[in-house]
Image: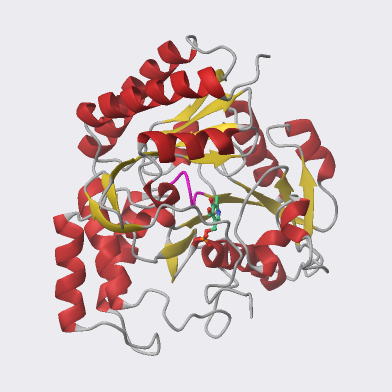
Amino acid sequence: MSITPLMPVYGRCEFRPVRGDHCHLIGEDGRRYLDFAAGIAVNILGHSHPGLIGAIQRQAETLMHVSNLYGSPQGERLAQRLVDLTFADTVFFTNSGAEAVECAIKTARAYHQHGGNDHKFELITFNNAFHGRTMGTISASSQEKMHKGFLPLLPGFRYVEFDDLDAAKAAIGPNTAGFLLEPIQGEGGIRTASDSFMHGLRALCDEQDLLLVLDEVQCGVARSGTFYAYEQYGIEPDILATAKGIGGGFPLGACLATEKAARGMVVGTHGSTYGGNPLAIAAGEAVLDAVGNEEFLAEVRALGDRLRGRLEQFIGNYPELFELVRGRGLMLGVKMKVEPRAFVAHLRDSHQLLTVSAGDNTLRIVPPLVIDDGHIDEFMDKLSAGAASYAAVEAPVS
Ligand SMILES: Cc1ncc(COP(=O)(O)O)c(C=O)c1O
């Protein structure tokens, strides 16, 4: 038998982390790595955060799991906090981002079907989007590499160019239920939707009774410098999927919706055995305790500005490697002139710096949100040493 016990769907590298220490990871061999990947934008409080550990420990000793058939004082509390912090009136808790997006898709379809418009089931989605790996969420993405081997896709999605309002408008037809998009595309390469695009989509939704569904699984929960990225556009969605950072590393996601958008989500229409169990909720509460306040968000913006400024200054030293810096808050990307995966591996293996590659040749920088200026200095030192050694040996002269 040649298959590995872990189903071989990931191209795992040789780094094998066994312990976390604030913004560093320690490998099996004892080496320390600066973690500016944060489990792909998950560990927003870093590793070994005392508040998060304490909350999980206390809750594990008290009550770990009960059925959603019972009342949930824990879930009600966290849902109320999210309602207070956002556009939403109601929340469904999930265990992952893809499940949060699935719930968002179902909520959008149910809105129209509850209103007697059974034909309005199609969501317009955007090229290079990533919404997860379930059948529904791969069907929502135009990326053929995720479809291969899993056909047929689910019907009900139409793809158009990201940030192209005319294309989005032209795609609206009798079956359209709404738009589903990431305000800042993560896997797609840290590509930020423009103000005019977001305002245009909101206006189209208002005019034509369509739903604006945001996937803030990656850019949400303080990462972009506001609690959710939509706040920076001065618009509100009807439905929003959130996950990753909201559990700080514990599996937790949620689908948030207005009362109107959630009109079809009545008893018996949706469910999850584990979704919103007390342990996950305790993690979510500890995360909100830390990040759900303006002081923390202002610090993320300030750190993001400083890191971005340093990156913008730095990339000019290697015009053969780097093109530009983009993103918001501590969700930054450096568009590279070379394929970024080998550079990410070089930073990791030769300089003990963890980053992630993303689409459109992007080096993705999504550190814990609790970094300080010392971590930014360490990051820039490692990045510059990595670029120097990479440019000397590997980079083709363009
Ligand atoms: C924008 C976005 N949506 C959905 C997902 C899927 O989340 P999960 O892997 O938790 O299912 C991701 C994961 O990277 C994501 O970045």
Highlighted range, magenta: 216-220
In the image, is 44 to the left or to the right of 172? left
Q: In which quarter of the image is residue 293?
A: top left
In the image, is 38 to the left or to the right of 142? left
In the image, is 250 to the left or to the right of 117? left
| Above or below, 59 relative to 21 | below
Task: Answer whether residue 292 is visible to the viewer in this image.
Answer: no
Where does residue 374 sit, x and y in percent of width and height?
20, 28
Where does residue 78 sit, x and y in percent of width and height?
30, 65
Where does residue 270 sit, x and y in percent of width and height?
55, 79
Where does residue 30 sit, x and y in percent of width and height?
25, 52
Identify the residue at image location x=41%, y=43%: 37
Identify the residue at image location x=63%, y=22%: 337
* Image quarter (top left, top right, bottom left or bottom right) of the N terminus: bottom right
Q: Between residues 43 and 214, which one lies in front from this camera angle? A: 43
In the image, is 328 to the left or to the right of 180? left
| Above or below, 353 relative to 277 | above
Residue 159 among those drawn in magenta: no
Prevailing SS of the magenta stretch? loop
